[in-house]
Amino acid sequence: MRYAIALSTLTLTLISAPATLLAASSSAPPAAGGSAVATSAASAQMYGADYEQCSAKTTMGIAECVAERAKVWDGRLNTAYQALTKRSDPAQRAPLKSAQRAWITYRDANCRFYGAGQGTISRIEGAECLRAMTQQRTCEMERANNPEGKAGEGCAP
């Protein structure tokens, strides 16, 4: 299956990936509350609030800004993962480590797909994929770490 997506004046054709494209805008990447890319466990908002903070820049500036936002989420992910590892039962630690390694492999391969497209817009897509997927995993880890199942700022309730 193929998807045609219009971003600004550039139209891209994507071959279906492990994630499902739900919607796209014809004039710009979707704003907060717009389209999302569904993952197997939960939805990670693509082109959401973190992207909006970067959207007034050049293509290169947007990609760099989104990559910086991904680093922030990655730091939170590492903190949440370490805390969850420490508070988990010994029998849970090996499966958690295995799951995290498999998730990293999947995330990196999935986002390479988006980043490998033609044109400079693919840099934004690859960076935004990393940011959104890392945000989703961070929120999952933070919820697992919290007895009330709550995650930190930037995570859906």
Image: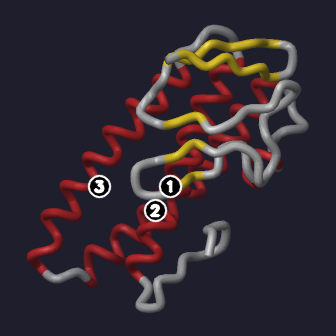
Q: Position of residue 154 (x, y in %)?
A: 66, 67
Q: Position of residue 13 (x, y in %)?
A: 62, 13
- Asked if residue 57 lies left or right of residue 20, the reply is right
Distance between the Cα atoms at labels 1 and 2?
5 Å
Residue 24 bears which disc, if any? none
Q: Is residue 135 above or below residue 38?
A: below
Q: Say which residue label 2 marks.
A: 77
Residue, x 79% and y 40% (percent of image)?
A: 30
Q: Secondary structure at mark 2?
A: helix
Most extreme residue toward the front is 1
Which quadrant of the figure has residue 92? bottom left
Q: Secondary structure at mark 3?
A: helix
Residue, x 13% and y 64% (percent of image)?
A: 94
Tell us which disc is closer to us: 3 or 1: 3
Q: Residues within 10 Å of mark 1 (few under 14, many from 20)?
A: some
Q: Position of residue 78 (x, y in %)?
A: 42, 62
| Sooner in the amino-acid sequence: mark 3 or mark 1 | 1
The type of residue carrying mark 1 is Asp
The type of residue carrying mark 3 is Gln
> Split into 4 quadrants, where in the image is the C terminus?
bottom right
| Sooner in the amino-acid sequence: mark 3 or mark 2 | 2
The answer to which of 123 and 155 lies nearer the viewer is 155
Residue 74 bears which disc, if any? 1
Q: Say which residue label 3 marks.
A: 100
- Asked if residue 14 lies left or right of residue 47, the reply is left
Q: Is residue 94 above or below residue 38?
A: below
The type of residue carrying mark 2 is Leu
Residue contact at pointers 1 and 2, CB within 8 angstroms: yes
